[in-house]
Image (cartoon, rainbow, N blue to C red):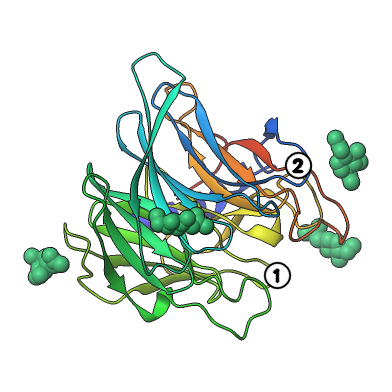
Amino acid sequence: MQLTYSIPFLTLLPTFITALPPTHLVYEAPNDTWLENLAARGCGSILPNLLHRFSSGSLTVGITETTPDTFQVIVASATLENNSIYTVSFLVNSDVPLIHLAATVSGAGLLNGLATLNPNTVLAADSYKGVVWAIDTLTGASRIAISDTLMAPLTTSVFESTIGINGIKLRGSTLYLTNSAQALFAKMEIQPNGTAINAAEVIAHSPPGTTYDDFALDGRRDAFLATSQGNTIEEVGRVGEPQIIVAGNINSTEIAEPTAAQFGRTLADRDVLYVTTAGGLEAPINGDERVGGQLVAVDTRGLWRA
Ligand SMILES: *[C@@H]1O[C@H](CO)[C@@H](O)[C@H](O)[C@H]1NC(C)=O
Ligand SMILES: *[C@@H]1O[C@H](CO)[C@@H](O)[C@H](O)[C@H]1NC(C)=O
Ligand SMILES: *[C@@H]1O[C@H](CO)[C@@H](O)[C@H](O)[C@H]1NC(C)=O
Ligand SMILES: *[C@@H]1O[C@H](CO)[C@@H](O)[C@H](O)[C@H]1NC(C)=O
């Protein structure tokens, strides 16, 4: 009996989506600046990660918080000769970071996404080698923790073909990951020391004309993925559920070449999805439009979700 009543109710729910949620520009970097990643501090400020792709300097690619107000950041030399982890910490009520080299990962290809395994250990996605490293930020020791076929790069796709595993996020014992070359979002169970329990399983594939970069997990069970040259944020739930564009448009610079996303951490902004962008530096919008790398806020409160 209840079921018969629930069917018309469910079919009405989607009418609550009247328009995509509002977005607003928080910050725009100068032209030719690539914002690759970000983290929100507990106090509410955002640390966007600048990636000066075309300079001779180094690239900063991944960031994760390991203990309150202590962040680990991947710094790769422009030649990719060295992939290092730097620890960036803030003293209480201070905006001045203390920075030191924590580890240099010898043998790494390109460290990209970063996740916290425990207060002393980070997991780092290696986009070129198609593996995940476990790196001890106190001793500097590193080892390959996971190698899986769903992490490998490809050489057949045109866009970012050499970038395999890209973003990683850990929730409990489940590691979520994107693979740009293989156009997929996947998950796997891992041990407390970072070793895989099972093979990775595909949750979703990025639609044609998009490439999954980094992503955020919400407080429920959904992921919000940056689609790179798709210029959108796509929400993905469980396997087989519809993949929904929640912000941006392929033809618009509103979210120009998004690279990563992160929910706010204060009561006031916990439903705000902060998105970093590359501004169309690699994939200009409509063929020729570029803006500086941006930090864009997407208000997700109005989103209908099952
Ligand atoms: C940035 O690039 C746009 C488009 O090419 C151009 O219109 C604008 O003047 C540039 N801004 C600066 C500060 O150079
Ligand atoms: C790479 O690391 C080695 C050892 O720390 C150092 O001597 C070298 O200058 C580094 N290369 C670059 C390009 O940073
Ligand atoms: C990780 O933990 C598992 C389960 O306890 C164990 O079998 C494995 O040997 C550990 N691996 C490393 C590298 O410590
Ligand atoms: C983007 O622009 C193209 C060319 O004008 C058009 O065919 C397409 O429908 C547009 N896509 C969206 C999502 O607006």
Beta carbon of the mark 1 residue lies under 8 A of ligand 4: no
The quadrant of the picture occupied by the N terminus is: bottom left
Are the residues flagged by discs 1 and 2 in contact, CB closer than 8 Å?
Answer: no
Label 1, label 2: how far apart the Cα atoms are: 22 Å
Beta carbon of the mark 2 residue lies under 8 A of ligand 1: yes
Between circles 1 and 2, the one closer to the viewer is 2
> Residue 121 appears at what percent x and percent y?
25, 49
**Residue 214 in view in this figure:** no
> Residue 182 appears at what percent x and percent y?
53, 77
Residue at position x 76%, y 42% in the image:
292
Q: Secondary structure at mark 2?
A: loop
Q: Quadrant of residue 29?
A: top right
Question: Residue lying farthest top?
Answer: 93
Residue 76 placement, left or right of 277: left
> Residue 297 appears at what percent x and percent y?
62, 34
Residue at position x 76%, y 47% in the image:
32
Dot placed on the residue nearer the N-terminal end, 1 or 2: 1
- Circle 2: residue type: Gly
Residue at position x 76%, y 61% in the image:
283
The 10 Å Cα crowd at callout 1, few under 14, some 14 to 19, many 20 or more, is few
Tell me the residue that label 1 is attached to: 209
> Residue 225 appears at what percent x and percent y?
54, 55
Residue 112's disc is none
Residue 48 placement, left or right of 64: right
- Circle 1: residue type: Gly
Tell me the residue that label 2 is attached to: 292
